[in-house]
Amino acid sequence: MPHLLHIQSSPRPQRSASIEVAQAFIGAWTSRHPQATVDTLDVWATPLPAFDGEALGAKYAALEGHERSAEQLKVWADIEALGQRFHRADLIVISVPMWNFGIPYRLKHLIDAVSQKDLLFTFDERGLLGLLGGRKAVVVAARGVALGENFPAAEFDHQTSYLTMWARMVGITEVHTVSVEKTLFGPEADTASRAQAKAEATALAASL
Ligand SMILES: Cc1cc2nc3c(=O)[nH]c(=O)nc-3n(C[C@H](O)[C@H](O)[C@H](O)COP(=O)(O)O)c2cc1C
């Protein structure tokens, strides 16, 4: 039975363009896969372990071949539980607002907490091996402005480019992107942009 993980990173769920478009995708995808299950991970509502102190100690204890303390084991169990939510998914949908041309810090916090050796990737002297191979990802990216003329993507897109790189780091090579732009240019432009992105997301769902 296919399983979808939706990582939601807008802190305004009622008005969010990225969540609205992601929900259009998920609605279309689940109607094609009626047996599918969906797990929603809202990064603002989910407790994320601070990555200092015990968590950092637990990471380096394993990397340096030391035993973990009881406190370190406890925090690591929380990190592994988050990681298992990624492993359970066949399809990972990330809905993401652009913040300062990058991603919201809370999504980066999730990524930093969960992207651990032997959980989402491994490495040796030959290189890096992602452990989420075979999965697909869809990034639904909202932006107040449009990338392009004034903000060339090559310089200004640290949102989808970062998440695509991260997906590759953990072994996901099939990444689709749907953008919803100009959400800050008044209700008309916002509505039109959402409608266009939802149509694109629905068409994409038909192919996945
Ligand atoms: C802290 C913050 C920083 C933002 N930075 C950018 C930015 O760099 N570029 C941009 O196009 N829009 C920026 N925006 C606007 C949001 O990307 C836009 O409102 C988008 O629709 C938010 O996604 P959401 O509707 O899913 O919450 C920013 C908004 C906030 C709150």
Image (cartoon, rainbow, N blue to C red):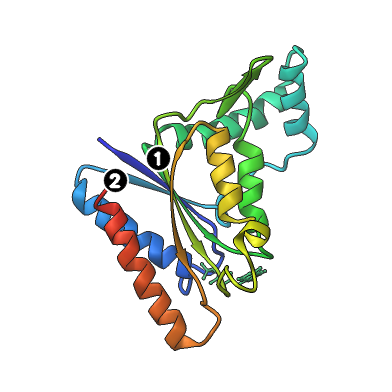
- Residue 206 as seen in the image, left or right of residue 120: left
> Which quadrant would the C terminus be assigned to in this image?
top left
Q: Which mark is residue 136?
A: 1
According to the picture, the residue beneath numbered tag 2 turns out to be: 208
Q: Residue furthest front?
A: 149
In front here: 137 or 3?
A: 137
Task: Estimate how packed mark 2 is, as few (under 14), some (14 to 19) or many (20 or more) residues with alpha carbons within 10 Å.
Answer: few
Query: How far across and down, in percent of the image, does residue 20 sit?
Result: 40, 67
Query: How far across and down, in percent of the image, does residue 84 sit?
Result: 48, 32
Toward which corner of the image does residue 76 lie, by quadrant?
top right
Secondary element at tag 1: strand
98 w.r.t. 134: above or below = below
- Residue 93 as seen in the image, left or right of residue 65: left
In front here: 63 or 101?
A: 101
Query: How far across and down, in percent of the image, does residue 52 sit?
Result: 78, 38
At label 1, the amino acid type is Lys
User: Do callouts 2 and 1 mark residues in contact (Cβ within 8 Å)?
Assistant: yes
12 w.r.t. 67: above or below = below
Task: Estimate how packed mark 1 is, as few (under 14), some (14 to 19) or many (20 or more) residues with alpha carbons within 10 Å.
Answer: many
> Which quadrant would the N terminus be assigned to in this image?
top left
Seen at 50% across and 31% down, the residue is 171
Seen at 53% across and 69% down, the residue is 12
Query: How far across and down, in percent of the image, does residue 178 sit?
Result: 43, 59
Q: Quadrant of ligand 1?
A: bottom right
How many badges with numbers are in the image?
2
87 w.r.t. 205: above or below = above
Label 1 beta carbon less than 8 Å to ligand 1: no
Q: Disc 2 and disc 1: Cα gap in Å? A: 9 Å
At label 2, the amino acid type is Leu
Disc 2 or 1, which lies upstream in sequence? 1
- Residue 61 as seen in the image, left or right of residue 87: right
163 w.r.t. 90: above or below = below
